[in-house]
Amino acid sequence: MKYKLMIAALVLGTGFCANGMNRVAAEEAGIETKLIDAMNTLFGKHPGLRANHAKGLVTQGVFKPSPEAAGISKAILFKGESIPVTLRFSDATGVPLIPDGSPNANPHGAAIKYHLPDGSETDMVLVSFKFFPIGTAEDFLTLLQAIAASPPDAAKPTALERFAASHPSVAAANATLATPASFAEEHYFGINAFIFTDAKGKTQAVRYQLVPDKLAHLSAEEAAKRAPDFLKTELTERLAKTPALFHLKAQLAAQGDDTKDPSKPWPDDRKIIDLGTITIEKIVPDSATAEKALLYLPGQVTEGIDVSDDPMIGIRDSSYAVSFSRRSQ
């Protein structure tokens, strides 16, 4: 596992990523801190909680790889053994009491930590956006600042409206969102590309998907009528009766598909393979305490899986580490 010795460095916000190189260009130094500062400005500071996706629920379960997975990646994750997982579902924003049915609670998140047989860990961080609204960290920072500068009484066109007009991917990404009827009935996407390497050294760019057995969304009117914590309540009651099943899948890039820009989705006709199933079995005994100690890093990979040329992976890692450092103080 490539990240084991770099966690301390990441918590200090150095910008290191899984391949051991500083992926943050010199001119971008500090962008991870600026992003977290912008989120704290937009959502407020809430001690002990994440700067984004502050409201969440931690669960435990098992990943069982498919036979097909071992043919595309030599990762220990896909060797055949069942792997324990810790999966955190979450609402968007850094507002800890945001109603689950609020449109601002989209995109919802699913962060997966795999506890590997050799004692190491690897992570996947997915959201319900089919693709990200913007392609660079600088544009993401500008977007956050534009939102903060666009209160309801702001003059038209607002800073957000001007930004969205020049970045059509914002509206396109938002159009892929809807409030789920359950955390267990949402489709989650890995917006960044990763590189699988098989036993013969062949490589393949992929993007992850976490697909529920049943997909169910609510209309905006239905969502507004639900209780503020209905997603947490529903999943708790569901798991008390029966496990929740997801299918982990990988969309395969074809020649010419963009692996650097998370705002550019690959065509729907690209092949999707089954990597295995994730069975969510229970809520952890003290979710609020457990989630404070959890740090999920998209770039925390294991042999057979590598980061792609997407610089946003390193930016996400560094930003999450800055947020973790602040909420740990």
Image (spheres, rainbow, N blue to C red):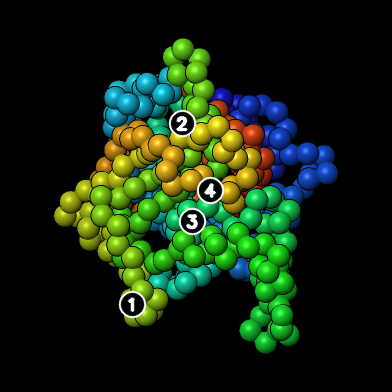
Residue at mark 1: 222
N-terminal label among 2 and 4: 2
Circle nearer the viewer, 2 or 3: 3
Q: Which residue occupies 63% across, 45% down?
A: 261
Q: Residues within 10 Å of mark 3 (few under 14, many from 20)?
A: many
Circle nearer the viewer, 2 or 4: 4
Q: Which residue occupies 34% across, 47% down?
A: 211
N-terminal label among 1 and 4: 1
Q: Nearer the viewer, residue 178 or 175?
A: 175
N-terminal label among 2 and 1: 2
Residue 300 visible to an observer of this rendering: no
Circle nearer the viewer, 4 or 3: 4
Q: Residues within 10 Å of mark 4 (few under 14, many from 20)?
A: some
Q: Secondary structure at mark 1?
A: helix
- Quadrant of the rendered structure where residue 70 is? top left
Extreme left residue here? 241
Residue at mark 4: 265
Residue at mark 2: 121
